[in-house]
Image (spheres, rainbow, N blue to C red):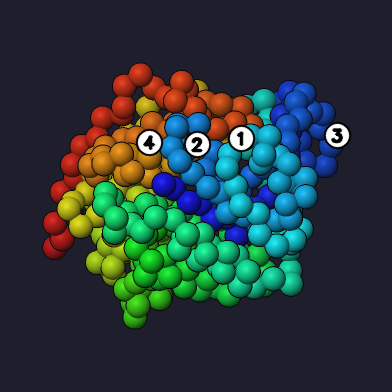
Amino acid sequence: MIITVTPNPSIDRTQSLDGPLVPGEVNRTVTDDVQAGGKGVNVATVCHTAGEDVVAVVPAANSSDFAALVRSSGVPAQFVGDAPVRTNITLTDGDGVTTKINSPGPTGTDGTDLTGALVTLLRGHESPDAGGPAPWVVLAGSLPPGYPEDWYARTTATAHELGYRVAVDTSGPALRALVDSAHHNPASAPDVIKPNAHELAEITGGDGAVLEDDAADGNLRPVVDAARSLVDTGFGAAMVSLGAAGAVLVDTDGAWYCPSPRVRAVSTVGAGDSSLAGYVLAAVRGGSSPERLGTAVAHGSAAVTLPGTTLPTPGDLPADTPAVRAVDDTPGD
Protein backbone atom coordinates (compact mmCIF):
# COMPACT_ATOMS: atom_id res chain seq x y z
CA MET A 1 0.00 0.00 0.00
CA ILE A 2 1.20 3.49 -0.92
CA ILE A 3 -0.64 6.53 0.42
CA THR A 4 0.32 9.92 -0.98
CA VAL A 5 -0.58 13.29 0.53
CA THR A 6 -0.49 16.54 -1.44
CA PRO A 7 -1.09 19.55 0.86
CA ASN A 8 -1.10 22.01 -2.06
CA PRO A 9 -2.61 20.31 -5.12
CA SER A 10 -2.97 22.10 -8.42
CA ILE A 11 -4.67 22.05 -11.75
CA ASP A 12 -1.70 21.95 -14.09
CA ARG A 13 -2.15 23.69 -17.41
CA THR A 14 0.71 22.89 -19.79
CA GLN A 15 1.11 24.80 -23.04
CA SER A 16 3.69 24.04 -25.69
CA LEU A 17 5.15 26.69 -27.96
CA ASP A 18 6.42 26.12 -31.50
CA GLY A 19 9.57 28.14 -30.83
CA PRO A 20 11.56 29.79 -28.01
CA LEU A 21 9.67 31.73 -25.36
CA VAL A 22 10.13 35.46 -26.04
CA PRO A 23 9.33 37.64 -22.98
CA GLY A 24 7.32 40.75 -23.79
CA GLU A 25 6.13 39.37 -27.13
CA VAL A 26 3.09 37.39 -28.30
CA ASN A 27 3.85 33.70 -27.95
CA ARG A 28 1.51 31.22 -29.64
CA THR A 29 0.83 27.73 -28.34
CA VAL A 30 0.54 24.55 -30.36
CA THR A 31 -0.82 22.31 -27.58
CA ASP A 32 -2.80 22.93 -24.41
CA ASP A 33 -3.21 20.22 -21.78
CA VAL A 34 -4.96 20.30 -18.38
CA GLN A 35 -4.31 17.67 -15.68
CA ALA A 36 -4.66 17.19 -11.95
CA GLY A 37 -1.28 17.89 -10.42
CA GLY A 38 0.78 18.26 -7.29
CA LYS A 39 3.75 16.14 -6.30
CA GLY A 40 1.83 13.57 -4.28
CA VAL A 41 -0.80 13.18 -7.00
CA ASN A 42 1.97 12.64 -9.56
CA VAL A 43 3.64 9.99 -7.40
CA ALA A 44 0.29 8.24 -6.93
CA THR A 45 -0.34 8.30 -10.69
CA VAL A 46 3.00 6.66 -11.52
CA CYS A 47 2.55 4.02 -8.82
CA HIS A 48 -1.05 3.33 -9.90
CA THR A 49 -0.10 2.79 -13.55
CA ALA A 50 2.65 0.46 -12.32
CA GLY A 51 -0.01 -1.73 -10.72
CA GLU A 52 0.43 -0.86 -7.05
CA ASP A 53 -2.37 -0.28 -4.54
CA VAL A 54 -2.44 3.47 -3.94
CA VAL A 55 -4.63 6.19 -2.43
CA ALA A 56 -4.01 9.89 -3.12
CA VAL A 57 -5.19 12.13 -0.26
CA VAL A 58 -5.84 15.71 -1.34
CA PRO A 59 -7.49 18.77 0.24
CA ALA A 60 -10.12 19.53 -2.38
CA ALA A 61 -13.89 19.37 -2.63
CA ASN A 62 -15.31 16.11 -3.93
CA SER A 63 -17.40 18.12 -6.41
CA SER A 64 -14.51 20.25 -7.70
CA ASP A 65 -13.04 20.32 -11.19
CA PHE A 66 -9.82 19.06 -9.64
CA ALA A 67 -11.57 15.97 -8.23
CA ALA A 68 -13.12 15.31 -11.63
CA LEU A 69 -9.67 15.39 -13.24
CA VAL A 70 -8.31 12.93 -10.67
CA ARG A 71 -11.25 10.56 -11.19
CA SER A 72 -10.77 10.71 -14.95
CA SER A 73 -7.20 9.46 -14.48
CA GLY A 74 -8.41 6.41 -12.57
CA VAL A 75 -6.20 7.08 -9.55
CA PRO A 76 -7.97 6.15 -6.28
CA ALA A 77 -8.31 9.29 -4.15
CA GLN A 78 -9.80 10.67 -0.97
CA PHE A 79 -10.85 14.32 -1.06
CA VAL A 80 -10.82 16.37 2.13
CA GLY A 81 -12.63 19.64 2.86
CA ASP A 82 -13.58 22.28 0.32
CA ALA A 83 -10.46 24.42 -0.10
CA PRO A 84 -10.02 25.89 -3.60
CA VAL A 85 -7.31 24.36 -5.77
CA ARG A 86 -4.71 26.62 -7.38
CA THR A 87 -3.85 26.61 -11.08
CA ASN A 88 -0.22 26.31 -12.20
CA ILE A 89 0.94 27.12 -15.71
CA THR A 90 3.83 25.43 -17.50
CA LEU A 91 5.22 26.72 -20.79
CA THR A 92 7.45 24.40 -22.80
CA ASP A 93 9.16 25.96 -25.80
CA GLY A 94 10.38 24.36 -28.97
CA ASP A 95 13.89 23.91 -27.53
CA GLY A 96 12.62 21.92 -24.56
CA VAL A 97 13.08 24.78 -22.08
CA THR A 98 10.39 24.73 -19.39
CA THR A 99 9.02 27.83 -17.65
CA LYS A 100 6.71 27.31 -14.68
CA ILE A 101 4.34 29.84 -13.13
CA ASN A 102 3.06 28.49 -9.81
CA SER A 103 0.37 30.00 -7.59
CA PRO A 104 0.96 29.95 -3.81
CA GLY A 105 -2.23 28.06 -2.96
CA PRO A 106 -5.27 28.82 -0.81
CA THR A 107 -5.23 30.78 2.42
CA GLY A 108 -7.45 30.22 5.43
CA THR A 109 -6.45 26.62 6.10
CA ASP A 110 -3.79 25.25 8.45
CA GLY A 111 -3.78 21.56 7.51
CA THR A 112 -5.68 20.33 10.58
CA ASP A 113 -8.47 18.76 8.54
CA LEU A 114 -5.98 17.10 6.18
CA THR A 115 -3.96 15.67 9.06
CA GLY A 116 -7.10 14.35 10.75
CA ALA A 117 -8.31 12.67 7.56
CA LEU A 118 -4.91 11.11 7.00
CA VAL A 119 -4.73 9.71 10.53
CA THR A 120 -8.20 8.19 10.13
CA LEU A 121 -7.15 6.61 6.84
CA LEU A 122 -3.93 5.21 8.28
CA ARG A 123 -5.71 3.74 11.27
CA GLY A 124 -8.35 2.23 9.02
CA HIS A 125 -5.88 0.15 7.08
CA GLU A 126 -4.68 -3.24 8.24
CA SER A 127 -1.99 -2.82 10.88
CA PRO A 128 1.53 -2.85 9.45
CA ASP A 129 2.40 -5.27 12.27
CA ALA A 130 0.13 -7.91 10.73
CA GLY A 131 3.03 -9.16 8.64
CA GLY A 132 5.17 -8.04 5.73
CA PRO A 133 6.94 -4.72 5.25
CA ALA A 134 5.38 -1.51 6.52
CA PRO A 135 3.41 0.43 3.89
CA TRP A 136 4.54 3.84 2.70
CA VAL A 137 3.19 7.33 3.14
CA VAL A 138 4.51 9.87 0.62
CA LEU A 139 4.25 13.52 1.70
CA ALA A 140 5.09 15.83 -1.15
CA GLY A 141 4.95 19.35 -2.47
CA SER A 142 4.83 22.90 -1.19
CA LEU A 143 2.67 24.03 1.73
CA PRO A 144 -0.23 26.49 1.33
CA PRO A 145 0.32 29.88 3.03
CA GLY A 146 -1.64 29.02 6.19
CA TYR A 147 0.13 25.77 7.05
CA PRO A 148 2.75 25.75 9.84
CA GLU A 149 6.27 25.30 8.50
CA ASP A 150 6.73 22.13 10.58
CA TRP A 151 3.63 20.40 9.13
CA TYR A 152 5.78 17.81 7.36
CA ALA A 153 7.78 17.11 10.50
CA ARG A 154 4.65 16.66 12.61
CA THR A 155 2.90 14.49 10.02
CA THR A 156 5.99 12.31 9.53
CA ALA A 157 6.17 11.69 13.29
CA THR A 158 2.47 10.78 13.38
CA ALA A 159 2.79 8.32 10.49
CA HIS A 160 5.82 6.72 12.14
CA GLU A 161 3.88 6.32 15.38
CA LEU A 162 1.22 4.42 13.40
CA GLY A 163 3.83 2.09 11.90
CA TYR A 164 4.28 3.51 8.41
CA ARG A 165 7.41 4.34 6.45
CA VAL A 166 7.55 7.91 5.18
CA ALA A 167 9.01 9.61 2.10
CA VAL A 168 9.12 13.41 1.88
CA ASP A 169 9.78 15.71 -1.07
CA THR A 170 9.48 19.40 -0.29
CA SER A 171 11.53 22.60 -0.33
CA GLY A 172 12.04 26.01 1.24
CA PRO A 173 10.97 26.67 4.84
CA ALA A 174 9.14 23.33 5.09
CA LEU A 175 12.34 21.46 4.22
CA ARG A 176 14.41 23.49 6.67
CA ALA A 177 11.84 22.90 9.42
CA LEU A 178 11.97 19.16 8.71
CA VAL A 179 15.75 19.12 9.15
CA ASP A 180 15.59 21.27 12.27
CA SER A 181 12.95 19.01 13.84
CA ALA A 182 14.99 15.87 13.21
CA HIS A 183 17.67 17.16 15.57
CA HIS A 184 15.36 16.97 18.60
CA ASN A 185 12.65 14.51 17.50
CA PRO A 186 13.96 11.44 15.64
CA ALA A 187 10.41 10.33 14.78
CA SER A 188 10.02 13.38 12.54
CA ALA A 189 12.90 12.31 10.27
CA PRO A 190 11.49 10.51 7.19
CA ASP A 191 12.73 7.17 5.89
CA VAL A 192 13.77 8.88 2.67
CA ILE A 193 14.01 12.50 1.62
CA LYS A 194 14.44 13.53 -2.02
CA PRO A 195 16.03 16.95 -2.47
CA ASN A 196 17.59 18.14 -5.68
CA ALA A 197 21.11 19.55 -5.57
CA HIS A 198 19.92 23.11 -4.96
CA GLU A 199 17.60 22.08 -2.12
CA LEU A 200 20.36 19.98 -0.57
CA ALA A 201 22.73 22.95 -0.67
CA GLU A 202 20.06 25.13 0.92
CA ILE A 203 19.89 22.93 4.02
CA THR A 204 23.50 21.76 4.27
CA GLY A 205 25.44 24.69 2.80
CA GLY A 206 27.26 25.12 -0.48
CA ASP A 207 26.05 25.77 -4.01
CA GLY A 208 23.65 23.46 -5.84
CA ALA A 209 25.03 24.27 -9.27
CA VAL A 210 28.52 23.40 -8.06
CA LEU A 211 27.26 20.09 -6.66
CA GLU A 212 25.77 19.23 -10.05
CA ASP A 213 28.89 20.32 -11.94
CA ASP A 214 31.16 18.36 -9.62
CA ALA A 215 29.02 15.24 -10.07
CA ALA A 216 29.06 15.65 -13.85
CA ASP A 217 32.87 15.83 -13.67
CA GLY A 218 33.00 12.64 -11.61
CA ASN A 219 33.58 14.27 -8.22
CA LEU A 220 30.80 12.85 -6.05
CA ARG A 221 32.41 13.56 -2.69
CA PRO A 222 30.66 16.94 -2.05
CA VAL A 223 27.14 15.68 -2.70
CA VAL A 224 27.72 12.40 -0.86
CA ASP A 225 29.11 14.22 2.18
CA ALA A 226 26.13 16.60 2.21
CA ALA A 227 23.63 13.74 1.91
CA ARG A 228 25.48 11.77 4.59
CA SER A 229 25.02 14.69 7.00
CA LEU A 230 21.24 14.23 6.70
CA VAL A 231 21.48 10.49 7.36
CA ASP A 232 23.69 11.20 10.36
CA THR A 233 20.93 13.51 11.62
CA GLY A 234 18.45 10.64 11.59
CA PHE A 235 17.02 10.49 8.08
CA GLY A 236 16.77 6.92 6.84
CA ALA A 237 18.04 7.82 3.38
CA ALA A 238 18.70 10.84 1.19
CA MET A 239 18.24 10.52 -2.57
CA VAL A 240 19.62 13.57 -4.35
CA SER A 241 18.68 14.29 -7.96
CA LEU A 242 21.49 15.91 -9.95
CA GLY A 243 19.78 16.85 -13.19
CA ALA A 244 21.44 15.38 -16.25
CA ALA A 245 24.22 14.00 -14.03
CA GLY A 246 21.89 11.40 -12.49
CA ALA A 247 21.30 10.83 -8.78
CA VAL A 248 23.01 9.80 -5.56
CA LEU A 249 21.53 7.73 -2.75
CA VAL A 250 23.01 7.66 0.75
CA ASP A 251 21.56 5.57 3.57
CA THR A 252 22.74 3.75 6.67
CA ASP A 253 24.17 0.93 4.53
CA GLY A 254 26.29 3.01 2.16
CA ALA A 255 26.26 5.33 -0.82
CA TRP A 256 25.52 4.77 -4.51
CA TYR A 257 25.56 6.73 -7.73
CA CYS A 258 23.49 6.22 -10.87
CA PRO A 259 24.18 8.28 -13.99
CA SER A 260 21.22 9.37 -16.06
CA PRO A 261 20.82 7.59 -19.41
CA ARG A 262 21.42 9.77 -22.44
CA VAL A 263 17.96 10.79 -23.62
CA ARG A 264 16.42 13.67 -25.54
CA ALA A 265 14.76 15.90 -22.97
CA VAL A 266 11.30 17.11 -23.99
CA SER A 267 9.97 18.34 -20.63
CA THR A 268 11.41 18.15 -17.12
CA VAL A 269 7.99 18.58 -15.46
CA GLY A 270 7.27 15.64 -13.16
CA ALA A 271 10.74 14.11 -13.44
CA GLY A 272 11.48 14.47 -9.73
CA ASP A 273 8.07 13.10 -8.77
CA SER A 274 8.59 10.16 -11.11
CA SER A 275 11.99 9.49 -9.53
CA LEU A 276 10.47 9.38 -6.05
CA ALA A 277 7.73 7.09 -7.33
CA GLY A 278 10.38 4.77 -8.75
CA TYR A 279 12.18 4.64 -5.41
CA VAL A 280 8.99 3.83 -3.51
CA LEU A 281 7.93 1.24 -6.08
CA ALA A 282 11.24 -0.58 -5.67
CA ALA A 283 10.98 -0.28 -1.89
CA VAL A 284 7.50 -1.83 -1.62
CA ARG A 285 8.70 -4.66 -3.87
CA GLY A 286 11.61 -5.43 -1.56
CA GLY A 287 14.34 -3.86 -3.68
CA SER A 288 17.81 -3.19 -2.28
CA SER A 289 19.21 0.32 -2.00
CA PRO A 290 20.96 0.13 -5.40
CA GLU A 291 17.77 -1.25 -6.97
CA ARG A 292 15.76 1.61 -5.50
CA LEU A 293 18.17 4.17 -6.93
CA GLY A 294 18.30 2.52 -10.34
CA THR A 295 14.51 2.32 -10.55
CA ALA A 296 14.25 5.95 -9.48
CA VAL A 297 16.64 7.13 -12.20
CA ALA A 298 14.88 4.96 -14.80
CA HIS A 299 11.56 6.64 -14.00
CA GLY A 300 13.02 10.14 -13.87
CA SER A 301 14.86 9.78 -17.17
CA ALA A 302 11.74 8.35 -18.82
CA ALA A 303 9.70 11.32 -17.58
CA VAL A 304 11.89 13.91 -19.31
CA THR A 305 11.33 12.24 -22.70
CA LEU A 306 7.57 12.79 -22.46
CA PRO A 307 5.71 15.99 -23.40
CA GLY A 308 4.26 18.44 -20.88
CA THR A 309 3.16 16.89 -17.62
CA THR A 310 2.91 13.35 -19.03
CA LEU A 311 4.10 10.81 -16.46
CA PRO A 312 5.85 7.55 -17.34
CA THR A 313 4.09 4.20 -17.48
CA PRO A 314 5.96 0.86 -17.35
CA GLY A 315 6.06 0.86 -21.15
CA ASP A 316 8.00 4.14 -21.19
CA LEU A 317 10.87 2.84 -19.04
CA PRO A 318 14.23 1.90 -20.57
CA ALA A 319 14.66 -1.78 -21.39
CA ASP A 320 17.56 -2.06 -18.96
CA THR A 321 17.71 -0.44 -15.52
CA PRO A 322 20.54 2.14 -15.41
CA ALA A 323 23.77 0.81 -13.90
CA VAL A 324 24.34 1.75 -10.26
CA ARG A 325 27.73 1.76 -8.60
CA ALA A 326 28.80 2.04 -4.98
CA VAL A 327 30.54 5.23 -3.87
CA ASP A 328 33.13 5.51 -1.12
CA ASP A 329 31.50 7.57 1.61
CA THR A 330 34.13 7.27 4.32
CA PRO A 331 34.78 10.70 5.84
CA GLY A 332 37.47 12.68 4.08
CA ASP A 333 40.38 14.40 5.75
| Residue at the far right in the pictured view | 26
Q: Give the amino acid at mark 4.
A: Val
Mark found first going from the N terminus, 1 or 4: 1
Mark found first going from the N terminus, 4 or 3: 3
At 74% from the left and 55% from the top, the residue drawn is 61
Q: Is residue 118 left or right of residue 331?
A: right
Residue closer to the observer: 30 or 154: 154
Mark found first going from the N terminus, 4 or 2: 2
Tell me residue 221's x, y (percent).
Answer: 24, 52
| Residue that carries the numbered disc 4 in the rendered image | 297
Q: In front: mark 4 or mark 2?
A: 2
User: Quick one: label 2, few (<14), some, or many (20+) residues within 10 Å?
Assistant: many
Separation (CA) of disc 1 from disc 4:
25 Å
Q: Give the amino acid at mark 3.
A: Val
At 70% from the left and 56% from the top, the residue drawn is 60
Q: Give the amino acid at mark 1.
A: Gly
Classify 36 as above or below 196. Answer: above
Mark found first going from the N terminus, 2 or 3: 3
Separation (CA) of disc 3 from disc 1:
37 Å
Query: Label 4's element?
Result: helix
Q: Which mark is residue 74?
A: 1
Q: Is residue 226 visible?
A: no
User: Quick one: label 1, few (<14), some, or many (20+) residues within 10 Å?
Assistant: few
At 45% from the left and 63% from the top, the residue drawn is 123
Q: Is residue 229 left or right of residue 140?
A: left
Mark found first going from the N terminus, 1 or 2: 2
For the residues bearing labels 1 and 2, Cβ distance under 8 angstroms: yes
For the residues bearing labels 4 and 2, Cβ distance under 8 angstroms: no
At 24% from the left and 66% from the top, the residue drawn is 232
| Residue that carries the numbered disc 2 in the rendered image | 48
| Residue that carries the numbered disc 3 in the rendered image | 26
